[in-house]
Amino acid sequence: MTVIAFIVGVVLLVVGLAVSIGLHEIGHLVPAKRFGVRVGRYMIGFGPTLWSRRFGETEYGIKALPIGGYISMAGMYPPSPTEEPAAVAVSADSASASAGSAPASPAPRASGPAGGRFFGAMVQDARLANDETLAGSAEGTFYALPVWKRIVIMLGGPFMNLVLAIVLFAIAFSGIGLQTATTTIASVNECVLPAGTTQTTCTSSDPVSPASAAGLRPGDQLVAVDGTPVSTFAEASAIVQASPGRPLPVVVERDGERQTLQVTPLLAERQVQGADGAVTTAEVGFVGMTATLEYVPQPLWEGPQAALAQTGQVFGIIWQLPVRVWDTAVDLVTGQSRDPNSPLSVVGAGRLAGEVAATDTPVLSRVASLLTILGSLNIALFVFNLVPLLPLDGGHVVIALWDGLKRRWAALFRRPPPRPVDATRLVPVTFVVVLAIAVMGGVLILADLINPIKLLG
């Protein structure tokens, strides 16, 4: 049953990730069509096509690997520069280097170094592929849109991921709720065991717990402690921990009637969580009772606040991603325990989702955890896609802003409008970025398979 639950968790995450990618691309697709851009393809995933159907000018499809997606817009870049000698005769070497593609500028590819010929071929291939989408007109093309429309289209995808993350966190926090210790007593210890002991049963030498000695029972509901009304178990615990050795009147409701019992907390070493969340060992008052846990729906704004707080944290660490991946690689090679805060690949996220689904906890708890994992993935997608490098959405935003800045500068000095920014010149940079992403992804996948994060122990 545990194996089946693990598989179900992985499948649910894969499906959720595919939906997230699909919504990301819809965030690009809808404004693109709204602004009149011709969209040839809308695809979820990469690799072989599993299913596709054409509706109007757009082919919609699903591919085998749900690790990304894309839409194909007409004229992502301006037409190839006519002043460059792209249409002259091509040597056999250049034709071979471009794998049978249309001609490129022969000078740099024939006389330059191998790297120059390689990147020159990539630039020319990108231009030729882009030219095929132009249909001889700027109408319906992305590059011809006003700057603000291009930015709206490119930010539409990440924005959808942020909205989805907020919705998922809202469902987890307000729809399901957070596990909260209530004022209802779940169990009463018979004796007081030393802190950190592996002993599980009481002996004659162990002192009777104050809660048991006072007559507290499971099912009692705490009403007041030391004359102070309490609405949460945490409030009652705070009074008890601050009052070792002092008799405390405790009002409980039992079988519909209220009773007052006398409890004298013992001074004992116990783990205490501070305001900053850190857990330390301290000498505090102890009575030996635990609370019943219930799911308490949080205010509607709690989920979105948690999502936005996590978004800020991810923004703070995204620039450290190469360093964190390097540290993960070092841990992998040296066999050291992996940092629980290290980045995850899709494989690691799937494994974590499987572990959550296989835990022996209430179903609602597992569902809430899966929702927050998927919400966190969408936050990561949102932030990562805003990195201002091609081929990420943030890179296209930077190109649009630079294009707008050039036009404003020309207008300010009453110069002729400049040519649109030719982003195909940045194909070599794009290649390096894609290669870096692939390498980092490969390292994280290996780490998630060999040295995985086990947040659940």
Image: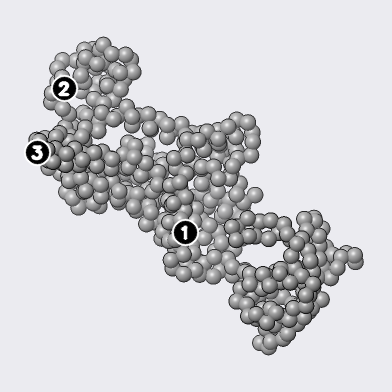
Amino acid type of the residue tagged 3 in the rendering: Arg
Q: In the displayed structure, would residue 113 be above or below residue 417?
A: above
Give the residue at x 66% y 73%: 236
* Mark 3 or 1, closer to the camera: 3
Give the residue at x 55% y 45%: 341
Task: Determine which residue is flagged by label 3.
Answer: 414
Q: In the displayed structure, would residue 406 be above or below residue 221?
A: above
Amino acid type of the residue tagged 2 in the rendering: Glu
Q: Which mark is residue 84?
A: 2
Q: Position of residue 357 (x, y in %)?
A: 56, 55
* Mark 2 or 3, closer to the camera: 3
Q: In the structure shown, which secondary structural element does the residue marked by tag 1 occupy?
A: helix
Q: Are marks 1 and 2 in contact (CB under 8 Å)?
A: no
Q: Which mark is residue 306?
A: 1
Front residue (pair 46, 389): 389
| Precedes in sequence: disc 3 or disc 1 | 1
Give the residue at x 51% y 46%: 349
Q: Which mark is residue 283?
A: none
Q: Position of residue 234 (x, y in %)?
A: 63, 69
In space, the residues marked 3 and 1 are separated at their CA atoms by: 49 Å
